[in-house]
Image (cartoon, coloured by chain):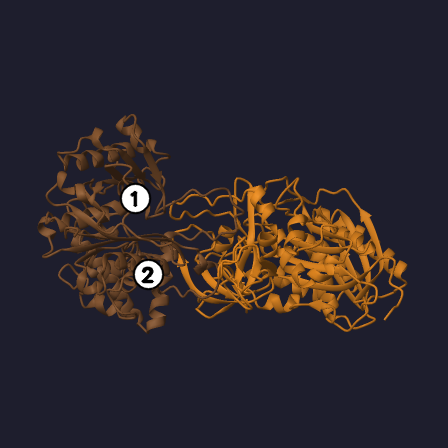
Amino acid sequence: MPSDPSPLGAIGAYAVHLPRHGLATTAFGDAGRPGRQARTVAAPDEDAVTLAVAAALPLADEIAGAASLLLATSQPPYLDKGSAATVHAALELPATVAAADLVGLRAGASALALALRGGGAVVAADLRTAAPGVPDELAHGDAAVAFVPARAGRPVVASVLAHVAATEELMERWRAPGEAHPTVWDERFSAGVLGAAASAAAVAALERAGIERPDHVVVACANPRAAAAARKALGGDGEDAALERLTGTSGAAHLGLLLADALDRAGAGETILALSAADGADAFVVRADVPAGAGRRGPSAREQAQALAYVTYDRFLRWRGLLEISGAKRPDPAPPAAPPALRTRDWKFGLVAARCSACGAVTTPPGRACAACGAIDAHEPVSLRDKPARVVSFTVDHLTPTPAPPLILAIVDVEGGGRRSVQVTDAPAAGIRVGDVLLPSFRRLSSTDGIHNYFWKARPEAA
Amino acid sequence: MASRGLSDRVAIVGMGCTPFRDHWDRSADDLIVDAVQECLASVPAIARADVDAYWVGTQGSGMSGMTLSKPLRMTGKPVTRVENFCATGSEAFRNACFAVASGAYDVVMATGVEKLKDSSFSGLTATWPPSDGTDVEWTAPGAFSLLAPAYADRYGVGEEQLRETLTHIAWKNHRNGALNARAQFRKEVPRAAISGAMKIAGPLGVMDCSGVADGAAAALIVRAEDAHLYTDRPVYLKGMGFVSGAGEGTAAEGYDFTTFPEVVASAQEAYRQAGVTDPRSEIALAEVHDCFTPTELVLMEDLGFSARGEGWRDVLDGAFDRDGAVAVNPDGGLKSFGHPIGATGLRMLFECFTQLRGEAGERQLPEVRLAVAQNLGGQPGACVAFMAIVGTEEPA
């Protein structure tokens, strides 16, 4: 284990989050099983922010000690307003941690290079949608991954030995704000340009790291022809492509996803060439400093990819807003107002309730008075964010329109105290039962008048 | 400090109630004028100018006392607008009672109105103040549907027995409403149509839900000692309770969704004031808040008509049918009479008033001396609850 961290930065821990759902076919009818290519699918209450929060949650304490938090995505839920600030709030980070967005398909690679060099944390989260009917519609997926920098006195999980960037102005794929999916230039033309940039960057990075042949090669590129050519040229073993056949390429999150998966496989001392090809290329040479998977928090990418619940194509289209189905006529949910959301930010974003200093009961939402004994202004904050909760009662609401029916609402009692009304998300087809254990999950409840309403839903433990 | 109540201190001497309907051709203004006119017409000795003060309850069909004074083009009178969820009409009545009992006024009128059918939304909607967006938006059927499985679990009632019980409640209330010209739905509904109806929330189908309707109602209230100046058949307030919940049922652990603690507390207060110790034998009829069928089931126990865990059996045995131990919702209830929110509380009193005076025609129950009007608003675990007991016995 090196005592002198690389000046290019070192990874202290990482975590991956894949959505619960997948899509295995673009034929209408059955959901089917993964064949040659499948993809991960975020539910309609997930976006880059919620996926980022899910990936970063196991690392929240470490991120709180980092210099900054960069959110890399091609799908920021807001322009102007930073999406990283919402992730920052959900993780209950100190205000002194700078949180900023990096946008675009290359953002994941850039954020990794910038953050690790400066002792910052990175979370890359993306949702990708191809135009319905294009041949590689299943080849793009949704994922999130988080890396925290190594800290003094703590084990180094992986060291960055080299990073070489090569920038190319190229109309390979592009998307104007508001468009549902990108437009792609002739794949063969782009593959040649990206392939050349990637090869040059890879060769230079390996040379800089003093490594002739890396133990692992992962290539992240939305252009499948370019990715396949680079893997072949660099002697990759195809493990990255195997994972990709279950997830699709996940935009700005993809390099991180493949790097995390490589760290799950690389023994201590083994080297990884991690190559991203977007707007040119970024080549990283990374050395694993601990045994395979030892730096990961939570389940691996592969474990999650193998546990996906596959949805039908019509459901996927509905979730992406590409197919609208009307329900009962009900008013749109009211958007949150800015001052109340700021006043209650610890509750809204951090799920911090109030524990009564007089009787010990937990009150939600927190207020001046205890719901159990009525004591006023006698309480301390208590976080419910990481606590499981048991279903006391629930209902299936057929009246409120939702893109992801059925809408399940439940009353849950939180382990250690507290009761919440929650929307249940990611429920299995069989539904839920009284007594089931649910975990908090940060989701987008609704979007009205261009305001996204984020709050904590609950999801089944096993999901 | 004590709650002394108004037992035998005030009397209802006249009432009005519009039919509850899809009143496409009538506004809230029209409906409230209809209810006030009918109410005044029922007491020839009182002209509009004789009424000293007014209360108007509406959940969302108007703002301020001008909801009443403007449609009547009435000048120079105090009008108070009140709102208390689905108990809004009851709240108008309650405050009007306090006003005459205090001696501040001699004759007051409580009114309630709701115009729901000008919105094209399904079910009820509400407008809330700007918020942080963290409250789960329970629809009414969603929130009340929690009662059914919780009750069944606690008392070991099977799924089929529960369904039969809920079906019986809806069937009974439609059967009662079929005899009521003012009811929104005036025909019996076969049990199979109730149990097989399209699901709305949890085990509740559309036929487990009350009717969304337009309507208005009104009551003239005076001090008990003055009642015979205006009518030979006054109806006296014997007891009245009201509780505004702390919402602890959804904010902290403990509540199990098989009862309304707020209803129990308000009922105990009303029974105490009225000297009722055995509700099932002393109360002839009860108008209760059957917003959804499981609500009526739970209320039978909360009001003391059934022992805990026995309500479902009593329902199936017909104990709350029109010829049962307690006639529950003989006018059809929210289920078939309809539920224009601000008017409902006064509509309940209208049936009590009509039955106590022997004016219910085909629906008339024998020997009615004490009647209950029970209303609630909100949702299980977080509600407001009202109860009034009215009777014909002259104050001592």
Residue A240 drawn above or below residue A314 = below
User: Looking at the picture, which amino acid does disc 2 mark?
Assistant: Val
Residue at image coords 83%, 64%: A152
Q: Which mark is residue A208?
A: none
Q: Residues within 10 Å of mark 2 (few under 14, many from 20)?
A: many
Q: Is residue B179 visible?
A: no
Residue at image coords 43%, 48%: A325
Disc 2 to disc 1, C-alpha distance: 22 Å
Judge from the rendering whether residue A309 lies leftward or rightward of residue B325; answer left or right.
Answer: right
- Shade of chain A as shown in the rendered figure: orange
Q: Residues within 10 Å of mark 1 (few under 14, many from 20)?
A: some
The kind of secondary structure element at disc 1 is: helix
Task: Give the quarter of the image for residue B276.
Answer: bottom left
Q: Which mark is residue B264?
A: 2
Q: Is residue A13 visible?
A: yes
Q: Nearer the viewer, mark 2 or mark 1?
A: 1
Coordinates of residue A132 in the picture (x, y in percent): 54, 49
Q: Which chain is brown?
A: B
Location of the C terminus of chain A by quadrant is bottom right
Coordinates of residue A445 in the picture (x, y in percent): 52, 51
Q: Which mark is residue B98?
A: 1
Coordinates of residue B349 in the picture (x, y in percent): 22, 48
Coordinates of residue A227 in the picture (x, y in percent): 72, 56
Residue at image coords 43%, 42%: B127
Location of the N terminus of chain A by quadrant is bottom right
The kind of secondary structure element at disc 2 is: helix
The verdict on a common chain for dots 2 and 1 is yes
Q: The residue marked by circle 1 belongs to what chain?
A: B
Q: Nearer the viewer, residue B262 or A452?
A: B262
